[in-house]
Image (cartoon, rainbow, N blue to C red):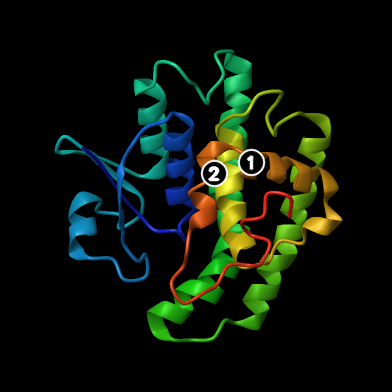
Amino acid sequence: MVLLIHHPVSPFSRKVRIVMGEKKMLFVPKEEEPWRLSQDVFKLNPSGELPVYIYDGNVVAGNYAICEFLEEISKDYKLLPADVKSRAEVRRLTEWFDDKFYREVYRNVVYEKVHKRFKSGQAPDSRILKAGLNNLNFHLEYIDWLAERNNYLAGENFSLADVAAAAHLSVLDYLGDVPWEGYKNAKLWYSKIKSRPSFKDILKDNIKGILPAKHYANLDF
């Protein structure tokens, strides 16, 4: 049995779930609130971060480690290209979203609107929120530019870069904070991602206490 400790508001959890969906790997989900983690999570992953992947009593913690692990054990379907140069580009873009996008957008928007609300009952800081939403436009411009030149973000084929970008954006889209209308190429790219079978469960996600945007599960926006 494979157990995945995750939460819908965690983009890294969504990333691993999409990867497992693409590879048709089954798992049993267990939710843990990232703003109120149990001691069990810290025992499994001392960093106290989600997701945590458990199989046959073994633990793989951290989204990078889990995704690389899943890529290595999967024989039939790969999300990293065989070509060295192409693989480097996929990893570059994956890091862009898992690091740069996370710091500049996710932490300024989702932490303010969701984490603070459930952790301490505080209202979001409007200055921080505004900075995050401004940064989001910069990242959407980049996605729009990439999507105009390629079938997918890192080239002609769907890859881990698309998974990472969509995982992060999907949390923002759940909250209704993505101004898709100003970025037609990014919107078309995301509609392709939303239509993939691996995204089906992501579109069913529910963050307790927060309703999704009306268009969230609509494949055609």
Q: Could you classify mark 2 by the number of other residues whose Cα lies within 10 Å: few (under 14), some (14-19), or many (20 or more)?
A: many
Q: Is residue 151 left or right of residue 95?
A: right
Q: Is residue 62 left or right of residue 9?
A: left
Q: Which residue is mark 2?
A: 199
Q: Which residue is mark 1?
A: 195
Evaluate whether residue 94 shows in this view.
no
Q: Position of residue 6 (x, y in %)?
A: 36, 54
Q: Which mark is residue 211?
A: none
Q: Amino acid at mark 2?
A: Phe
CA–CA distance between discs 1 and 2? 7 Å
Residue at 60 percent across and 82 percent down: it is 125
Residue at 55 percent across and 75 percent down: it is 113
Callouts 1 and 2 close, C-beta under 8 Å:
yes
Q: Position of residue 116 (x, y in %)?
A: 47, 78
Is the residue 17 above or below the residue 178 in the image? Answer: above
Q: Could you classify mark 1 by the number of other residues whose Cα lies within 10 Å: few (under 14), some (14-19), or many (20 or more)?
A: some
Q: Secondary structure at mark 2?
A: helix
Q: Quadrant of the N terminus?
A: top left
Q: Is residue 29 left or right of residue 91?
A: left
Q: Quadrant of residue 39?
A: bottom left
Q: Position of residue 203 (x, y in %)?
A: 55, 53
Residue at 48 percent across and 86 percent down: it is 122
Q: Amino acid at mark 1?
A: Ser
